[in-house]
Amino acid sequence: MPETSCWVFGYGSLLWRPGFEWIEKVPASLEGWARRFWQGSPDHRGTRRWPGRVVTLIRRHNARCRGYAFRLPDAARASILAQLDVREQGGYQQHTLPISLADGRSANAVTWIAGPGNPDFLGPATYPELARHIASCRGPSGTNVEYFLHLFERLQNLGTSELHVRRIACWLKQM
C-alpha cells in the first residue's frame, strides 16, 4: 500500500451511507474513544428548534470504538474530504487519528468529532431521556429512530455491542 493512502474512519452514518467512492472498506477500531449520542443534529435528524441526537466520539480511557475504515482513491481524495467537511458540519471538526484495521494493519484515518465546545453539543443524559429524545425527533434526513436503528444494525453486523447503544435500544423498545 502506498504511503499516500488516505483512510476515513466511519463510526456513525458513514457505516450505512458513506456517500463517497472508496477502494477498500475494512472493519477498524479506534482506541481511547467511545461512541456517544451526545451531539445535536439540527440539520439532518432534527430541527433547530428540536435537534435529534447523533453520535460523536468522547475520549475514554480503555474505550474502543469499532467502525469501518474506507481507503480513498488518491485522485478523488481532496474532493471526498471536502464533501465530507460539508456533510459533517454542525459542530464536527476533522481529526486524523491512528486506527487498527481488522486485518492487522494500522493506519492514520480522518474522522469527524463534535466536541463539547460546539454549539450543538447536547451532552450526556439518562438512558430514558436519550431514548425519549431519539424517539421524538425528525429532520430532513428522516427520523432520529431510523438513524439509531441503522447504527444498531451495522454495529451488530460488525459483531460489536456497546453498552451505551444497547441501553438506549432497551429503552426505545419499551416506548
Image (cartoon, rainbow, N blue to C red):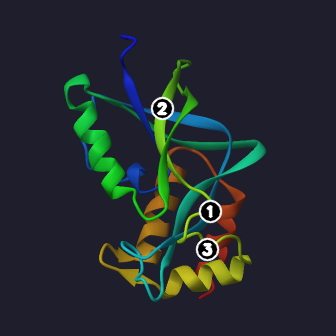
Specify whether 93 is left or right of 84. Answer: right
Figure label count: 3
**Amino acid on which the number 1 mark rests in the picture:** Gly
Return the disc, 1 or 2, that comes first in the chain's sequence.
Answer: 2
Q: Which corner quadrant holds the N terminus?
A: top left
Looking at the image, which residue is at 37% across and 73% down?
A: 43
- Residue 36 lies left or right of residue 44; in this view the side is right
Question: Compared with residue 81, is residue 148 higher up or lower down, i.e. above or below?
Answer: below
Q: In the image, 23: left or right of 101?
A: left
> x and y percent of residue 38 in the render?
61, 67
| SS of the residue under disc 3 | loop
Q: Is residue 134 above or below residue 68?
A: below
Inspect the image, locate mark 3, and give the three-letter code of the amino acid beneath it.
Leu
In percent of width and height, residue 7 lies at: 41, 30
Which residue is tagged 2? 109
Dot 1 corresponds to which residue?
Answer: 117
Which residue type does callout 2 highlight?
A: Ala
Q: Secondary structure at mark 1?
A: loop
